[in-house]
Image: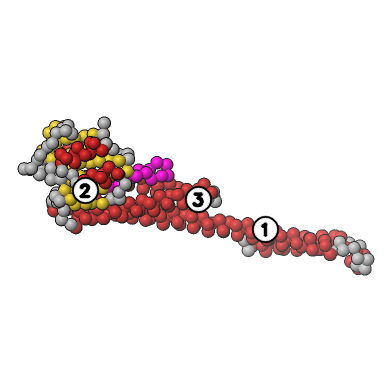
Amino acid sequence: MTVVAATLYRNGQKIRDIPLDETIRCDHDKSEFVWIGLLEPTDAELLDLQQRYDLHPLAVEDALKAHQLPKVDIYGDQLFVVAQTAHLEGDDICYGETAIFVGHSHIITVRHGSARAHAQLRHQLEAAPSLLRHGVDYVLHAILDFIVDGYLPMVEAIEDSVLEMERATLDRFLGRPEVTRLFKLRRELIRFQRILAPMAEVAGKFVRIDMPCIDPDARPYFSDVLDHVRRVQTMVDGLRDVLTSVFEVSNLLEQQRTGDITRQLAAWAAILAVPTAIAGIYGMNFKNMPELQVHDGYFIVLAVIATLCVTLYIRFRRSGWL
């Protein structure tokens, strides 16, 4: 069964549930309207609603395909709105689509792949009849606000993961899995930004443009939705910058640690070069080497080697190479 709910409201109060095969006409009062919620309906169900509520065929076709970017279309005295939902599964941002048909006395929502049902939203609106009595434009605002508010926990979860990786970067090298995860999160955020921009445009149209079924008094509500979208956009922009900085800081720290190791190896190589060079000179086996006849030559050479090595060690130590 794809019908989640079909309800008649009047003056902000729920009157009764209605069957889909019943056509409700509410031509006298804005506060009387029908709200029908569908989850992945069949073609037959949506085509039946098309005939009963005079839905535009192009809008119905878009609602059935469910592969649209956020948008708002005007068909005579009705609106067709598409909004993208998003939720997090692991490190993947998964998307759904909610198509909304808005008429003077009806609002029909068609959900595809959305992880959040509208039941909670209905209960909240029914608990505030003074707002629900404003009609379909207020319900439309509430649905868009509900979808946009669902973005925030997802972005906050990604933010927590990124900050945790940022802290780990200061303590150790990032391994290949972590670097791969960084780039994956960056790709997901770039894709998400492609959804946020059209969503902001949709909310902005309701604020700036006169549209059928939308009362001018409802514009402040849609302005609030626009503010929420912009807030999420700002957070995503900041997250992308943090992801880039984590990778850059990781590279810088890795270069610094590699440089420290290189300096240590160079210092020890210089120290070990002293006995190697001296031992090499006296290991050439020439007969005419005067130093070979010195009675205490062996001890003198060892003392010279030890003195030079200790001196080099102290200087490297003071310069921070060891």
279 on left or right of 253: right
Location of mark 3 (residue): 179
Amino acid marked by disc 2: Phe
* Label disc, if present, on residue 80 of the rendered structure: 2
Residue 100, percent across and down?
22, 44
Q: Is residue 307 above or below residue 50?
A: below
- At x 15%, y 43%, the residue is 54
Judge by depth and name the residue closer to the eye, 70 or 313.
70
Q: Based on the picture, tell me whether residue 99 belongs to the magenta stretch.
A: no
Location of mark 1 (residue): 265
What separation in Å lies between label 3 and label 2 (alpha carbons)?
A: 42 Å
Residue 302, percent across and down?
82, 60
Question: What segment carries the magenta color?
Answer: 83-95
- At x 85%, y 60%, the residue is 299
- At x 10%, y 42%, the residue is 31
Tell me if mark 3 has few (under 14), some (14-19) or many (20+) residues whose alpha carbon lies within 10 angstroms of its own: some
Q: Quadrant of the N terminus?
A: top left
Q: Is residue 4 above or below residue 314?
A: above
**Sequence-earlier tag: 3 or 1:** 3
Give the overall secondary structure of the magenta segment: strand
31 on left or right of 92: left
SS at badge 2: strand
Give the colouring mode of the picture.
secondary structure
Q: Quadrant of the C terminus?
A: bottom right
Amino acid marked by disc 1: Leu
SS at badge 3: helix
Judge by depth and name the residue closer to the eye, 97 or 261.
97
Amino acid marked by disc 3: Val
Tell me if mark 2 has few (under 14), some (14-19) or many (20+) residues whose alpha carbon lies within 10 angstroms of its own: many
